[in-house]
Amino acid sequence: MSIDKYQETYIQTNFADRIGGSNYGKDTNIYKFEKIKRAKASAKKDFPDVELIDLGVGEPDEMADAGIVAALAAEAAKPENRGYADNGIPEFKTAAAAYLKNVFNVDGIDADTEIVHSIGSKPALAMLPSCFINPGDVTIMTVPGYPVMGTHTKYLGGEVFNIQLTKENNFLPDLTAIPEDIAKRAKLLYLNYPNNPTGASATVEFFTEVVEWAKKYNVVVVHDAPYAALTYDGKKPFSFLSVPGAKDVGVELHSLSKSYNMTGWRIGFVAGNPLVVKAFSDVKDNNDSGQFIAIQKAAAYGLNHPEITEKIAEKYSRRHDMLVAALNELGFQAEKPKGSFFLYVEAPKGVVGGRRFESGEDFSQFLIREKLISSVPWDDAGNFVRFSVTFIASGEEEEKRVIAEIKRRLSDVEFEF
């Protein structure tokens, strides 16, 4: 039976308002990533013999390290690992605490009370508002950014206040611009550095300001740090929890998805304030039964071998260097980030003597439909596109070929900035 047929039944009127109520499924708006998906399909159809270069995908292009895969295989074969994991195993929490110490120089984390595993960062972000948000409460978020916490805040009857990340402020939020009444009603402040999509990194000074602001207004800070270990050019991995007072005001979310090529494994952890960790654990206990113990043990192996991430970061750093150089030769003002695998670039105003780009989305559509180069547009705070250096390429020579092909395709037009 078709969906249209079901829309004629009482089920259509029973949907919760939070997902659209009786109008659920009838919205004709096409969301950004669906537009990208459709444009990619159209470009492949129109140019079947031309390689599509995907700079839009936000996940690693390689398998997890062989040692991690071997650990999973060994642990998956053990009958004692077959059962529910609930809120996690001590071995993983101990490895996570050691990882914070060894990689980020975070001292004094109690593995028992200040760390709990999560089935990736996304579910943790989705569940945290349930710990704090009542109707009328506020979650403060940055745009551009990852909307999951905002979505669940709204589900709970809360409100979302957005702060723009601008180039003029190094893509850091201006906390002084938050209205006093919003700050007083706020329960959560959500941050993400190194940042998706801007690639910006936070500083000790900024996080110190965050701690002081949070204490002043009694706000819980949630720092989402899935890219924190992917840093370049001598910049050391940096944790919010390494700043004095951070553990008094919040938690940090880590994930092995990006730093260990483990996106599909769905494993991460929440660390920091013990009360927040406990509350999250209680909410989590009512949402899931824990990640497969064998995956937790394989992840512990990875956390105990941070050199795996260092090797991955070397690859991304090399690709950033090549992509930045190619774009700048074409007239862009691209600047290599100090972390993450994202390159955030201001969109041109148009092509000299040709079409105009009124937004990042206009430029992104031009790239995919006419040049078969996929990107992600961001128009929340200026007109930008996000390129990712996770494009498919096996080895340095293949990387050079891909970058040269990007430059060749964009060299037949002159962009106006």
Image (spheres, rainbow, N blue to C red):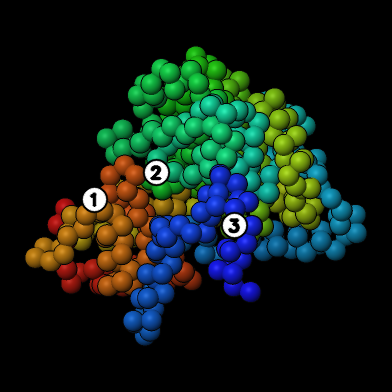
Identify the element where label 1 is drawn.
loop
The label nearer to you, 2 versus 1, is 2
Q: Are marks 3 and 1 in contact (CB under 8 Å)?
A: no
- Kindly give the residue lying farthest to the top in the view shown: 216
Which residue is more in the foreground, 191 or 310?
191
Q: Quadrant of the N terminus?
A: bottom right
The amino acid marked with disc number 3 is Gln
How far apart marks 2 and 3 lie (CA) works out to: 33 Å
Q: Are marks 2 and 1 in contact (CB under 8 Å)?
A: no
Numbered label attached to residue 12: 3
Q: Are marks 2 and 3 in contact (CB under 8 Å)?
A: no
- Using the image, determine if residue 3 lies above or below residue 209: below
Q: Which residue is mark 1?
A: 333
How far apart marks 2 and 1 lie (CA) works out to: 19 Å
The amino acid marked with disc number 1 is Gln
Q: Which residue is mark 2?
A: 144
Residue 359 image position (x, y, % from top left):
26, 53
Left or right of 337? Residue 282 is right
Residue 332 image position (x, y, % from top left):
22, 55
Residue name at image x 32 percent, y 48 percent: 379
Residue 86 sits in quarter = top right
Residue 235 visible to the viewer:
no
- Kindly give the residue lying farthest to the left in the view shown: 353
Numbered label attached to residue 40: none
- Using the image, determine if residue 88 lies above or below residue 415: above
Crowding at dot 3, Cα within 10 Å, few <14 / some 14-19 / many 20+, comes out as some
Residue 181 visible to the viewer:
yes
Which residue is more in the foreground, 14 or 388?
14
Residue name at image x 44 percent, y 43 percent: 145
